[in-house]
Structure formats: structure tokens, C-alpha cells
Image (spheres, rainbow, N blue to C red):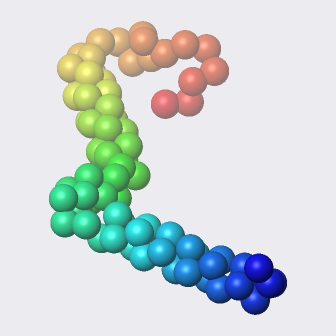
Amino acid sequence: MTIETLREIGLVLGSVAFLAICWWAFSPKRKKRFEEDANLPFADEERQADKEKSAAQQDESNSGDKPGANRKQGQDK
């Protein structure tokens, strides 16, 4: 077995591995999972917006209180 034969075997195995990864990545039954994974960064932003919205609603409900009653020392808001 010469070095050329080993190189050819390596080329074939590398090509098969590449094609297998491409088939796995572009398989139709994995499309939904990859679309959900692609939207993960936006899910964090949605949760943050929901928290801010609920905090704003809570502040509005407490707006009838004496100004600064719920503030702790050092808060600027």
C-alpha cells in the first residue's frame, strides 16, 4: 500500500463524510428544528419585552402612590 493509495482512500472518506453532513443538514425532516433554532436569539428579546411590559404595567398601577414611595436609595427612576 503506497502513500498514493492512502491519499485516495482519505479523499474518498472525506468526500463521503462531507456528503453525509450535507444530507443531514438539508434533510427535510430536520427543517422545522433548524428553523426553531434559528429563532432562539429572538425568543430572548421577546421575553425581555414581556418583562418590560409587565414592569411598566406594574408601575402604572402604582402611579397613584406617593412619588418615590417604592424607590430604594440610589435608584434614579
Q: Is residue 42 visible?
A: no
Residue furthest bottom in the image: 4
- Residue 21, percent across and down? 43, 67
Location of residue 27 by image quarter: bottom left
Q: Residue at x 55, y 13 (%)?
A: 72
Location of residue 3 by image quarter: bottom right
Which is nearer the eye, 49 or 12? 12
Viewed as shown, does residue 76 lie left or right of 23? right
Which is nearer the eye, 5 or 52? 5
Q: How many marks?
A: 0
Which is nearer the eye, 38 or 25? 25
Location of residue 50 by image quarter: top left
Q: Is residue 6 visible?
A: yes
In the rendered image, the vertical position of residue 23 relative to residue 77, given as above or below = below
Quadrant where the image shows the N terminus: bottom right
Q: Residue at x 75, y 89 (%)?
A: 4
Viewed as shown, does residue 18 lie left or right of 5? left
Viewed as shown, does residue 7 lie left or right of 41? right
In the rendered image, the vertical position of residue 76 relative to residue 36, given as above or below = above
- Residue 54, percent across and down? 26, 29
Q: Residue at x 57, y 24 (%)?
A: 75
Q: Residue at x 65, y 77 (%)?
A: 10
Residue furthest right in the image: 3
In the rendered image, the vertical position of residue 59 relative to residue 14, given as above or below = above
Which is nearer the eye, 62 or 51? 51
- Residue 25, percent across and down? 36, 66
In the rendered image, the vertical position of residue 11 relative to residue 54, given as above or below = below
